[in-house]
Image: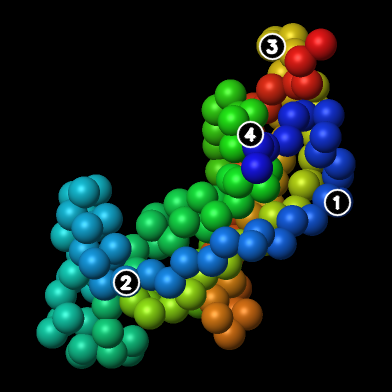
Amino acid sequence: MAGLYFEQFEVGQRFVHEIRRTVTDMDNMLFSSLTYNPAAIHIDHAYAAGTEFGKPLMNSIFTLGLVIGLSIQDTTFGTTVGNLGMTDTTFPKPVFAGDTIRSETVVKELRPSRSRPGQGIVTFEHIGLNQRDEIVCRTMRAGLMLAKPA
């Protein structure tokens, strides 16, 4: 399914994305390695066992990317020009290997681009939830979107 064009979004529009993903220890190790993040809380099981969590935490930037990625098919696949930024990103609950993450999106704001005719800016609120419906990630993302072709 292709993403939506700028004019197809409405403020308040809500998407409950169908695709979910169970995260693994390998996801965490690989992502932390690829991004040069050697934090023991992510990659060292012995260290993490001594923390309040008792096991490694999933890298929060991986979680953020996954939550946004799970939204793409329904919202911006093939219609995004680019991401303009993310703000107000929080991680209220930790994510661990074995958790299943899903995503919901709400359109918060729309405005035509002043400098790019035929494009508009959509502000999305992305919410990531685990298998217990606990919020594990929330972020506001501004996307530069294509307008519908004439």
Front-lying residue, 73 or 97: 73
Q: Estimate how packed mark 1 is, as few (under 14), some (14 to 19) or many (20 or more) residues with alpha carbons within 10 Å.
A: few
The CA span between labels 2 and 3 is 41 Å
Residue that badge 3 annotates: 116
Q: Where residue 137 sits in the image (x, y, percent)?
A: 55, 64
Which residue has dot 2 on it? 24
Which of the 4 image quadrants contains residue 116? top right
Q: Which residue is mark 1?
A: 12
Q: In the rendered image, which quarter contains the N terminus? A: top right
Mark nearer the N terminus (3 vs 4): 3
Spatial separation of the CA atoms under disc 1 and disc 3: 24 Å
Structural distance between the alpha carbons of marks 2 and 4: 29 Å
Q: Is residue 56 left or right of residue 148?
A: left
Comes first in the chain, label 2 or label 4: 2
Query: Is 78 placed left or right of 43 in the picture?
Result: right
Give the image location of residue 28, x and y in percent: 28, 65
Question: What is the three-letter code of the residue carrying label 2?
Answer: Thr
Q: Residues within 10 Å of mark 3 (few under 14, many from 20)?
A: few
Q: Where is mark 4, residue-wise?
A: 143
Mark 2 surroundings: few (<14), some (14-19) or many (≥20) residues within 10 A: some
The residue under label 3 is which amino acid type?
Answer: Arg
The answer to whether residue 123 shows anywhere in this view is yes
The spot of residue 144 in percent (x, y) is 64, 27
Disc 4 crowd, CA 10 A, few/some/many (<14, 14-19, 20+): many
* Mark 3 secondary-structure assignment: loop
| Mark 2 and mark 3 residues within 8 Å of each other at the beta carbon | no
Total numbered badges shown on the rendered structure:
4
Tell me which label, 1 or 4, sits earlier in the chain: 1
**Cα separation between marks 1 and 2:** 33 Å
Residue 58 in the image, given as x and y percentages of width and height: 34, 69
